[in-house]
Image: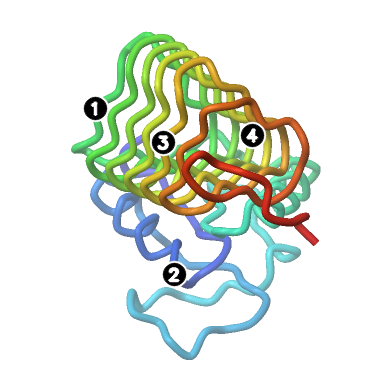
């Protein structure tokens, strides 16, 4: 993998951490795709057009923070037969050898992932979060900095677990659910929406 060329889909905010991880892991960053060329270009990357102009001979990494948009781009690139078998993992992350990390996942510094964890495609596991044993995280979900998932927690697809949240052991969280920063989840949450507080309660629908 080291020395492979990689191009980034999306170039702002979240992508900066992705770019630095790629460089630290020995990838050759050749440029970025976005809806338009960015005036702010802190890494002096070449603009390579929208993802519709993608060169399938270069590995893409989807560095977009929005979960649904990440999924949309992934599905588009998959139809184009792009090589999507890449994840970016910080050298300081601690990950059990028995855990499974799927493609297009970003794992930042200070993350701890304990045994028998399964992380789906396109996830963001952000700075200092802790994923305890036997947890399952669905596709295109984001575990924000400082979050703690106790043992046997199940997170659905396209979820956002806010910074410094705590999810009690054995809890199940369904698809398309946002947990507000600092929340403590002590009961299962099945229906899509935004939930906040300690204990965590329904606030409003997503739209």
**Mark 4 sits on what residue?**
139
> Which label was assigned to residue 13?
2
Q: Are marks 4 and 3 in contact (CB under 8 Å)?
A: no
**Residue 67, horizontal then vertical, whole percent:** 64, 51
In the picture, measured across the screen, residue 205 lies left or right of residue 154, that is right
**Residue 23, horizontal then vertical, whole percent:** 28, 54
Between the residue at mark 1 and the residue at mark 2, the CA separation in whole angstroms equals 24 Å
Between the residue at mark 3 and the residue at mark 1, the CA separation in whole angstroms equals 19 Å
- Element class at badge 2: loop
Question: Where, quadrant-wise, is the N terminus in this rendering?
Answer: top left
> Which label was assigned to residue 166?
3
4 or 1: tag closer to the N-terminus: 1
Question: Where, quadrant-wise, is the C terminus in this rendering?
Answer: bottom right
Between the residue at mark 2 and the residue at mark 4, the CA separation in whole angstroms equals 21 Å
Q: Are marks 1 and 2 in contact (CB under 8 Å)?
A: no
**Residue 92, horizontal then vertical, whole percent:** 19, 37
3 or 1: tag closer to the N-terminus: 1
Q: How many marks?
A: 4
> Which label was assigned to residue 205?
none
**Residue 126, horizontal then vertical, whole percent:** 38, 46
2 or 4: tag closer to the N-terminus: 2
3 or 2: tag closer to the N-terminus: 2
Other-residue count near label 1 (Cα within 10 Å), few / some / many at <14 / 14–19 / ≥20: some
In the picture, measured across the screen, residue 30 lies left or right of residue 179, that is left
**Mark 1 sits on what residue?**
94
Residue at horizontal 43 percent and vertical 86 percent from the top: 40
Name the one closer to the observer, 131 or 184.
Answer: 184
- Element class at badge 1: strand
From the viewer's perspective, is the residue at label 4 or at label 3 nearer? 3
- Element class at badge 4: loop
Q: Most extreme residue toward the left, as rendered?
A: 92
């Amino acid at each position: 993998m080291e020395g492979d060329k990689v191009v980034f889909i999306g170039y702002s905010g979240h992508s900066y951490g992705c770019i630095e991880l790629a460089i630290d892991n020995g990838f050759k960053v050749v440029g970025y795709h976005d809806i338009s060329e960015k005036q702010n270009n802190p890494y002096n990357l070449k603009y390579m057009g929208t993802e519709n102009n993608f060169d399938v001979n270069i590995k893409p990494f989807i560095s977009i923070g929005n979960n649904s948009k990440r999924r949309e781009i992934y599905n588009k690139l998959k139809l184009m037969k792009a090589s999507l078998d890449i994840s970016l993992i910080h050298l300081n992350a601690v990950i059990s050898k028995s855990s499974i990390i799927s493609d297009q996942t970003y794992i930042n510094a200070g993350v701890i992932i304990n045994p028998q964890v399964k992380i789906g495609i396109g996830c963001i596991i952000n700075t200092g979060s802790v994923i305890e044993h036997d947890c399952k995280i669905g596709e295109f979900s984001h575990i924000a900095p400082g979050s703690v998932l106790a043992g046997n927690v199940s997170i659905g697809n396209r979820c956002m677990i806010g910074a410094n949240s705590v999810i009690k052991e054995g809890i199940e969280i369904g698809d398309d659910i946002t947990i507000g920063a600092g929340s403590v989840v002590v009961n299962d949450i099945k229906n899509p929406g935004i939930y906040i507080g300690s204990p965590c309660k329904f606030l409003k629908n997503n739209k």
